[in-house]
Image (cartoon, rainbow, N blue to C red):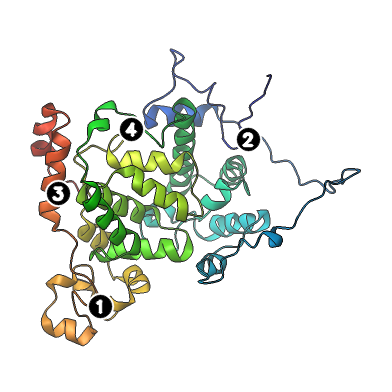
Amino acid sequence: MAFQSHAGLLLHDPERLTTRSGTPYGVFTPFWNTLVKTVDPGRPEPAPTRVPAPPTLPASERLEDWALRPSAPDWAAGLRAAWTPGEASAQERLDAFLAAGLEGYADLRDRPDRPATSKLAPSLAWGEISPRQIWSACQMRPPSPGREGFLRQLGWREFCYHGLHRFPDMAERPLKAPFARFPWAGPEESQAALARWRRGLTGYPLVDAGMRALWATGWMHNRVRMVVASFLVKHLLVDWRAGLAWFHDTLVDADPANNPAGWQWVAGCGSDAAPYFRIFNPVTQAERFDPEGAYVRRWVPELARLPAPVIHRPWTASALDLAAAGVRLGQNYPRPQVDHPQARARALAALASLDEGRKGQEKQHGELF
């Protein structure tokens, strides 16, 4: 059977963007350098003025006839409140971001407490806007760290899709073969840990805020995604594919490339992945990127009255502060699911078991985050 493939969802055809030897790129930086030099998004075509109907239409049903919308409970209410699907809405978000967000993107993109990201990922995932449109619109803006940082994120998306083209089973197996024998926690422990993580009841406020935001809106800030993914895989030793499946079911921007590539990156088993010893500390990450606790207060209201110094580590708060904030640890907010230093040590031991030669790296690099 003859077929044709088109790279309409991408900036460049994966078959044509290769190394000098003709092989696909496995590392992002050289991939990005080549992409920037060769990408030609073209000029966006105007929308058609009319779309003629076919002479006859097949018998069909309306979407409403399928009764797909949830009603009892209406778990999609938050999604409807947060998102307006369609091409027009995507273009409005792009225009708003270019006008007010692009300039400060490089400085603020890691702050979940600030509206600093474009939130265009769902529209890209569903084809409501193309990366070529976004690239062309950005190129019309003057060069700046914000513009270059944002285009680089489009480059990461491209890198993920080129990886999927090369490894279509990326959601099912680790790209680094040794990780196939990683000693994950047992089924019973994993299921219990996964349940608390899904519900945002880990006892680590930033992790819980991210998981609750995901359930309520179908979206999570990228910095927080890295933290919650690292927590599941490395603090709890739950197989990254379980987290991938939950993200696939709950994210409005879930797609077959970014989702598995992101999880493999965090787990350390993907293409150009984070080093295995990179274990995000959920407390220091929160203190750095949500310094006043605004993000946590929004999504973990039971902690809202705690002061900023302890809102990210309520188990260290004084009895007086806890009482004043109405926080009863172990009752209306859980104690930490695991102890960070102990969980980190367990993860490093498990990861080192894959390759004894890596043991010295942990001493050399220490805890980077």
- Place of residue 43 in the rendered image (x, y in percent of width and height, measured from the top left): 68, 38
Q: Which x, y percent locates residue 351?
A: 17, 37
Nearer-N-terminus badge (2/3): 2
Could you say which is closer to the camera, residue 195 or residue 309?
195
188 or 195, nearer to the observer: 188
Residue identifier under label 1: 332
Q: Position of residue 282 (x, y in %)?
A: 23, 58
List the single residue furthest toward the top: 21
Tell me how many marks there are. Answer: 4
Q: Amino acid at mark 3?
A: Arg
| Residue 175, label in figure | none
State the separation of the CA atoms marked 1 and 2.
49 Å
Query: What secondary structure is found at the residue carrying circle 2?
Result: loop
Please state which amino acid type lies under the numbered disc 1: Asn
Q: Position of residue 230 (x, y in %)?
A: 27, 49
Circles 4 and 1: CB distance less than 8 Å?
A: no
* Between discs 3 and 4, the one toward the N terminus: 4
Q: CA distance from mark 1 to mark 3?
A: 27 Å
Mark sitting earlier along the chain (1/2) = 2
Q: Amino acid at mark 2?
A: Gly
The secondary structure type at the circle numbered 1 is: loop
The 10 Å Cα crowd at callout 1, few under 14, some 14 to 19, many 20 or more, is: few
The answer to whether residue 177 shows anywhere in this view is yes
Find disc 4 in the rendering and name its residue: 174
Above or below — where is 191 with respect to 317?
above
Cα separation between marks 2 and 4 = 27 Å
The residue identified by callout 3 is 344
Q: Which mark is residue 8?
A: 2
Residue 112 at least partly seen = no
Q: Is residue 233 above or below residue 23?
A: below
* Disc 3 element: helix
Q: Residue at x 35, y 49 (%)?
A: 243
